[in-house]
């Protein structure tokens, strides 16, 4: 599913389609399910650089990918950026951050 998601995202970019947080969110979620934390973090940063709306759900998915990849430092950086961006954190946010630290 991740390969297909990345392919669709690349296809949309190549055709100059205006991407939204929905497009990125779907791919970041696929990254979270497969533990591809580097891709998830990269896409989350790309969203921010492209001035796309960041969401709690997208940030949670990126943190979950970091947790599955045993990258607690990255998960905590995302959690911190979430707080700085004034995104509303929820139970999933705290759980992903704590779970990532447990896997050190």
Image (cartoon, rainbow, N blue to C red):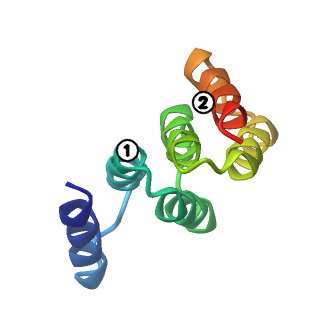
Q: Earlier in the sequence, mark 1 or mark 2?
A: 1
Question: Which mark, residue 43?
Answer: none
| Callout 2 crowding tier (Cα within 10 Å): few <14, some 14–19, many ≥20 | many
Q: Nearer the viewer, residue 72 or 8?
A: 72
Q: Residue furthest top?
A: 91
Q: Nearer the viewer, residue 68 or 74?
A: 68
| Callout 1 crowding tier (Cα within 10 Å): few <14, some 14–19, many ≥20 | many
Q: Position of residue 21 (x, y in %)?
A: 42, 50
- Residue 90 quadrant: top right
Quadrant including the C terminus? top right
Q: Nearer the viewer, residue 74 or 14?
A: 74
Q: Residue furthest front?
A: 104
With respect to residue 31, does 95 lie above or below? above
The residue carrying mark 2 is: 96
The residues tagged by marks 1 and 2 sit, at their Cα atoms, a distance apart of: 13 Å
Which residue is depicted at the point 51% across and 43% down? 68
With respect to residue 56, does 75 lie above or below? below
Task: Please state which of the two labelled residues, at mark 1 or mark 2, is closer to the viewer.
Answer: 2
Q: Position of residue 78 (x, y in %)?
A: 69, 46
Question: Disc 1 on helix, strand or loop?
Answer: helix
- Residue 19 quadrant: bottom left
Q: Position of residue 30 (x, y in %)?
A: 32, 49
Quadrant including the N terminus? bottom left
Q: Nearer the viewer, residue 59 or 2?
A: 2
With respect to residue 46, does 57 lie above or below? above
Callout count: 2
Q: Residue furthest bottom?
A: 14
The residue carrying mark 1 is: 29
């Amino acid at each position: 599913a991740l390969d297909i998601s990345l392919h669709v995202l690349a296809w949309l970019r190549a055709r100059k389609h205006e991407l939204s947080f929905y497009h990125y969110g779907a791919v970041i979620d696929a990254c979270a399910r497969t533990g591809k934390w580097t891709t998830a973090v990269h896409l989350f940063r790309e969203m921010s650089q492209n001035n796309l709306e960041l969401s709690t759900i997208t940030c949670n998915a990126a943190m979950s990918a970091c947790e599955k990849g045993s990258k607690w430092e990255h998960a905590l950086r995302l959690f911190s950026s979430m707080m700085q961006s004034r995104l509303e954190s929820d139970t999933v946010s705290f759980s992903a951050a704590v779970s990532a630290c447990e896997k050190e």
